[in-house]
Image: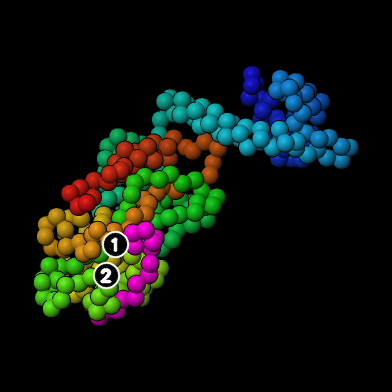
Amino acid sequence: MNDLGHLRTFLAVAKAGSFAGAARDLSRSTTAVSRHLQDLEAELGTRLFNRTTRRVTLTEAGEILLAEGSRLIDDADALADRLGSLQTGARGLLRVTASASFGARHLIPAVANFRRAYPDVTLDLSVTDRRVDLVEEGVDVALRVGRVDGGSLRVRRLATARLVIVAAPRLLDGLDFTPTTQTLDRLPCLIDRNLSTTDRWPLADPGQGTTLVPITGPITLDDAEAVRTSAVEGLGLALLPSFLVGDDVRAGRLRIVFADEVTLETDLSVLYPETRAPAAKVRVFIDHLVSVFRDPPYWDRDLF
């Protein structure tokens, strides 16, 4: 395909559903649009549209070109933006959101290094467990833990995030029986309102996928850091991400329980609004996150 301009014209006609509509969108004459399409069909050796007096519809070849051609144009625009940013540089306000626990422990140190590399970028950080709507609230980048459906957002996976069951050594040593997954309902568990199922924990069952096991406990909380502190104080077992409790496990304040049976894996991902070519400040920030949060994540060192 020798001319991306012809491809852009094709995409405009496919979007508008007519040559006249595409001509208006492209600020060109209908004759010019028609000529571009004829040249493109001649180059490819296939018809891309079925034409009638009222409208045009895509042929099978046109459907394929629409899907693949859109990606080609996006890649070309992204490349142009990246090359252009070598001259303009990354600058301006960048709005970022992450969960409270991950943001405080891991995002802010990463931001500190980013600021040293890109001093012309200022940041507005929303460190909250509230689910932020990026498009509605004008946020550029979000870090999310868990399986995500991006919808209208782009999603880039960064690393593996693991959920583990932990407890203070003194709590485990004080039990009069050996804890197992089958006796979990007899153990004091910290109930976390942030989990999708507060009264059941999802446990990885080898060969069977994930099962939900009922739990009970003396304390209900709505903050992950509070759950972690309660676990360290011996108030109960907790289901928490390893990025939150890794230092406690290494220091001996907590133990991972049932590590071979119930360590659950999910994703740490970065989300950002769908645009043809992300701004330089967004692109370099995401590249920085990829370099910092990559498999195996540093917080899992010596744990598994």
Q: What amino acid is labelled 2 in the image?
A: Thr
Looking at this rendering, what residue extends furthest in the right direction? 53
Looking at this rendering, what residue extends furthest in the front direction? 207
Query: In terms of depth relative to the viewer, which is nearer, 87 or 271?
Result: 271
Q: Is residue 142 above or below residue 18?
A: below
Element type at mark 1: helix
* Residue 208, horizontal then vertical, whole percent: 39, 61
At x 34%, y 55%, the residue is 265
Find residue 61 and name its label.
none
| Residue 212 in magenta stretch | yes
Q: Is residue 216 left or right of residue 81?
A: left
Spatial CA distance of label 2 from label 1 is 8 Å
- Label 2: few (<14), some (14–19) or many (≥20) C-alpha neighbours in 10 Å: some
Element type at mark 2: helix
Q: Is residue 17 above or below residue 257?
A: above
Q: Which residue is mark 1?
A: 262
- Label 1: few (<14), some (14–19) or many (≥20) C-alpha neighbours in 10 Å: many
At x 14%, y 55%, the residue is 250
Q: Is residue 21 left or right of residue 116?
A: right
Query: In terms of depth relative to the viewer, which is nearer, 77 or 53?
Result: 53
Evaluate if marks 2 and 1 touch, with contact meaning CB atoms under 8 Å apart.
Answer: yes
Q: Is residue 77 visible?
A: no
At x 33%, y 65%, the residue is 203
- Whichever of labels 2 and 1 marks the residue nearer the N terminus, that label is 2
Q: Which residue is mark 2?
A: 181
Q: Is residue 107 above or below residue 64?
A: below
* Residue 284, horizontal then vertical, whole percent: 39, 36
Q: Which residues are magenta?
A: 204-220
